[in-house]
Amino acid sequence: MKRTFRSMTGWLSVSLMALLLWTHGSYLVSAQSDESNPNGNQEVSSNSSIAQLNEEAAVLYRQALENNMEEVRASIVRISNSLEHVSFEGKTSVEGIHALSETVVEVKEAAAKFKGDKPLLQQASAKLRLAADSLANPAKPLWLQYYKIVKNDLDALSLAANQNETAAVLANRYSVLEDHYETIRPAAMIRLEPYQIAQIDAWLSHLKGLTQAKQSDTSQIRSMAAHGEELVNGLFGREKDESAFVPFVQGADRRAAGLVISSAIAAALCYAGYRKYRAQQQDIFTYRR
């Protein structure tokens, strides 16, 4: 009986020791795994923070549509706090970070106005919604769904030029196109290279000058609109933008227009470089490496 009891006691002791050793070994393996893969843990944490930012931006957009200013301001505070915990390394460029942070500032300014500027707040919150989604869903961002909208705006402007509409009509058609582009611009900046955005900006700047002239040159507007189709396709990744550098202004002013647009692109790229330098010098709160 004693022998049996001692045997059972010994067996239990050995089992307990084995269990303790296994538990300790598992802990060491887990700890070593965490230490050997810190980037993986940071990646999970970063993705989680970006997902929370995206969800909060969606909430803000809904509250802005309902003009619920109390909830809008509360949502802005949560978004500002969440930005402090987001690491953008490998997610977007410095220009993309600035585009996102500037959109947050726009929302704050619109909400801070007396009783809120409803149209301005809705547009700013839509920009932030698309920008946050572009960061959270790089494969299929929502802003790509604006392709048909922007394409229709461009077609409407081209049609107005073909029909020799008045300067007021042409200016209105351009204004609609510009508003829709500005809505998606931060989201596009997060995903695309700065030079791609600079091309669109320069094209729109020249087109704006043509549509707001006292005597509109409809032939030039038609040429600009035709070239714009290539740029828009390139912006949304519909096809290669092979003609981005092909002269798109016809007539005697072609060289002058080309110089103006080239200068605008160069200025935009220089400004982007300056913004990157200033961000690194001032340690902007949204820029974390």
Image (tube, rainbow, N blue to C red):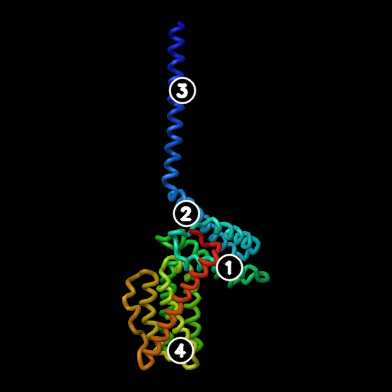
Q: Are marks 1 and 4 in contact (CB under 8 Å)?
A: no
Kindly identify which residue carries mark 2: 47
Mark 4 is on which residue type? Glu
Task: Look at discs 3 and 4 and give the one toward the viewer.
Answer: 3
Residue 79, image quadrant: bottom right
Distance in Å between CA atoms under marks 1 and 2? 23 Å
Q: Position of residue 107 (x, y in %)?
A: 58, 67
Q: Residues within 10 Å of mark 1 (few under 14, many from 20)?
A: some
Kindly identify which residue carries mark 3: 16
Q: Secondary structure at mark 3?
A: helix
Mark 3 is on which residue type? Leu
Task: Look at discs 2 and 4 and give the one toward the viewer.
Answer: 2
Distance in Å between CA atoms under marks 2 and 4? 50 Å
Q: Position of residue 155 (x, y in %)?
A: 41, 79
Q: Residues within 10 Å of mark 2 (few under 14, many from 20)?
A: some
Front in this rendered view, residue 95 or 204: 95
Kindly identify which residue carries mark 4: 165
Up-down relation of residue 259 to residue 102 (above or below): below
Q: Which residue lies at the image location 60% right of the left edge and 60% below the top edge?
A: 75
Q: Secondary structure at mark 4?
A: loop
Up-down relation of residue 52 to residue 117 (above or below): above
Q: Secondary structure at mark 1?
A: helix
Q: Are marks 1 and 2 in contact (CB under 8 Å)?
A: no
Up-down relation of residue 135 to residue 221 (above or below): above
Kindly identify which residue carries mark 1: 105
The quarter of the rendered structure image containing the N terminus is: top left
Mark 1 is on which residue type? Val
Front in this rendered view, residue 205 or 115: 205
